[in-house]
Image (cartoon, helix red, strand yellow):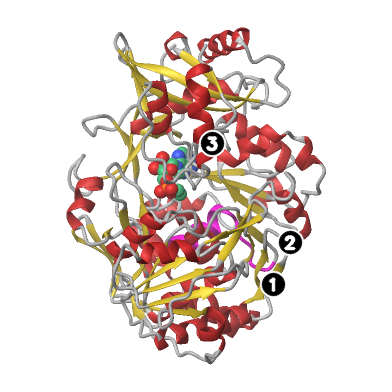
Amino acid sequence: MSENQTTDAQGLSGEIPAEGFPPPPEFAAQANVGADVYERAAADRVGFWEEAARRLDWTQEWDQALDWSNPPFAKWFVGGKLNVAVNCVDRHVEAGHGDQVAYHWVGEPGDTRTITYAQLKDQVCQAANALVELGVQTGDRVAIYLPMIPEAVVSMLACARIGAVHMVVFGGFSPDALASRITDADAHVVITADGGYRRGAPSGLKPNVDEALGKTDGVRNVVVVKRTGQDVDWTEGRDIWWDDLVGRQSTEHEAESFDAEHPLYIMYTSGTTAKPKGVLHTSGGYLTQVSYTHWASFDIKPDTDVFWTAADVGWVTGHSYIVYGPLSNRTTSVMYEGTPDTPHQGRWWEIIAEYGVTVLYTAPTTIRTFMKWGEDVPAKFDLSSLRLLGSVGEPINPEAWLWYHKNIGGGRCPVVDTWWQTETGAHMVNPLPGVTTLKPGAAQSPFPGIGVKVVDEEGNPIEPGATGYLVLTEPWPSMLRTIWGDDERYKDTYWSRYGQGVYFAGDGAKLDEDGDIWLLGRVDDVMNVSGHRISTTEVESALVSHPAVAEAAVVGATDPTTGQGIVAFVILRGNAEDSGEELVKGLRQHVRKEIGPIASPRQIMVVQELPKTRSGKIMRRLLRDVAENRELGDDTTLTDSAVMDQNSAKLPTSQD
Ligand code: WTA
């Protein structure tokens, strides 16, 4: 069999109807966008985005929608002016929706807060005044290192309101990581908390900031939200409690408008080198695409939907689809502080039932964790409010898609698999729920107004049925504008491989016979075995379609004969009866059957846990090290270093 075989053939044909999953007629009938959107966008791409931009309030109209005269440096809505925070908050209050809930916030210990748009406006104005009092000026960078509490959103919007550039660092990052980001962004103010709740216990954040500030200069003030009540060290003159500073401010703040290209935020993301890249997003184009995609991909109805992006606000998914997308669309959102299994494995489903969540957006890795826990957990809760499901962050294997569709979506909710990146700012490749006939496991189609191609090594478009690299062929409104302070690296990383104006995403993709796009994971995760290109994802997908396997991670380990050999790490389902040699043989046989002999793993190791980054991505580099018997690499971003300890202790002895 060829490596280009599509994943939908992987033993799941019984569960995938021949006609795929067409939009349920009642869903299609009420959908925000219909099939005509593709034609409109194709007929006038830039005009289509101008129309999307008009969904926002501008205090000054742009003169030029797109300036691409100096690629790869794009400018969108040139000459236009707006205030991002006003678009997210004030305009809804002014339109009479001040009493609508912006966030139902749920703390891990069970405490809750309900924040209306009017309350959010007051808090953002107070925080904006507080930043001004601290001397923060337009264009200054402000570091935000907070747990998943409403003050994170308030802080981001306060920055946007005064034209300061926020730089949110995920609360799970180490003091070193925080320090290097503060230094690179040259931030002078840090907003943090004493701590946050994670897995049933308070975990400190302020001590990390104190440690980080020993490794970077220039921070004048640390604003500290009281969340856990932990004891904290205090540096007089530098540290100040949020409640003292923000609490005494006026709830009135007159917002200025900023240029469409005014910087909105920096988000660091890891690249191939040790130094993280500061991805820079700007105001008008970013908000336009984030807002429009949120509305179209998730079919958002501001009056009735309860939307939940179950991600951390410290990642781009949180920025775009917890904060800017939902608020710009006047959505009511759920925001949850903690982990899915605290205090019990049904916590998410309990929250959905309690708040009547209608749209849930999460990552495949979490879905597979839920699969591991078993379908009887969600079955105990009333999930009938759900009408749409989303997926993001990695390719969703068909088995997880089907499980999600059936056990969470009750078989009635479209599953929208969204491909995008920190760099793209917003959705780029995904089906539209009222239009597309869904194929489990595929992100399928470029979003309207987005130029996407799959090309070979030389940059030539590939034929249906073949595998290649995903590239973006046209500038898009929410594209990163540069890497903070490093225009050259911006050009080299993304725009140098296929010539001027072509963005190299770093993802492999294949086109099926219908021309639909299947993302295959990062190209550095593509293995080359005896000259055959095999995606780690494809083998993982085959493994998890075996009834005994809950989760699988596959890496290509150097092999003297074949170039690379496939090494698989698998977590078994709780009910798997066998975990010995017979099972491993059976799994290998299963992969041979599903994909072909070339994909048969050289080695299969049964493990208890997989090492994951804080954002839930499997750390293949570490697994490769284990597979190749090397010393383990830098694991500072592991979710729980104990996991890797356990793995490194276990793996070498659990080979078959
Ligand atoms: C991967 C997260 C397949 C991809 C929004 C991309 C996906 C990287 C999908 C960006 C998807 C994200 N299908 N792969 N639906 N979504 N990816 O910057 O490899 O954290 O390049 O942004 O995640 O990860 P990032």
Residue lying at 78% horizontally and 49% vertically, measured from the top left: 384
Is 293 in the magenta? yes
Cβ–Cβ below 8 Å for labels 1 and 3? no
Residue lying at 57% horizontally and 33% vertically, measured from the top left: 440
- C-alpha gap between disc 1 and disc 2: 13 Å
| Horizontal and vertical percent position of residue 19 | 62, 29
| Horizontal and vertical percent position of residue 598 | 42, 11
- The residue singled out by tag 3 in the image is 643
Residue lying at 43% horizontally and 65% vertically, measured from the top left: 209
Is ligand 1 within 8 Å of the beta carbon of the residue shown at mark 3?
no
- C-alpha gap between disc 3 and disc 2: 27 Å
Secondary element type, mark 2: loop
- The residue singled out by tag 2 in the image is 110
Q: Is residue 163 above or below residue 445?
A: below
Between discs 1 and 3, the one toward the N terminus:
1
Q: Nearer the viewer, mark 3 or mark 2?
A: 3
The amino acid beneath tag 1 is: Thr
Q: Which residues are magenta?
A: 289-303
Q: Nearer the viewer, mark 1 or mark 2?
A: 2
- C-alpha gap between disc 1 and disc 3: 36 Å
The amino acid beneath tag 2 is: Gly
Q: Judge by depth and name the residue closer to the eye, 434 or 271.
A: 271
- The residue singled out by tag 1 in the image is 114
Question: Ligand 1 shows up in which quadrant of the image?
Answer: top left
**Residue count near mark 2 (Cα–Cα under 10 Å), binned few <14, some 14–19, many ≥20:** few
Secondary element type, mark 3: helix
The amino acid beneath tag 3 is: Val
**Residue count near mark 3 (Cα–Cα under 10 Å), binned few <14, some 14–19, many ≥20:** some
Between discs 3 and 2, the one toward the N terminus:
2
Q: Is residue 282 above or below residue 445?
A: below
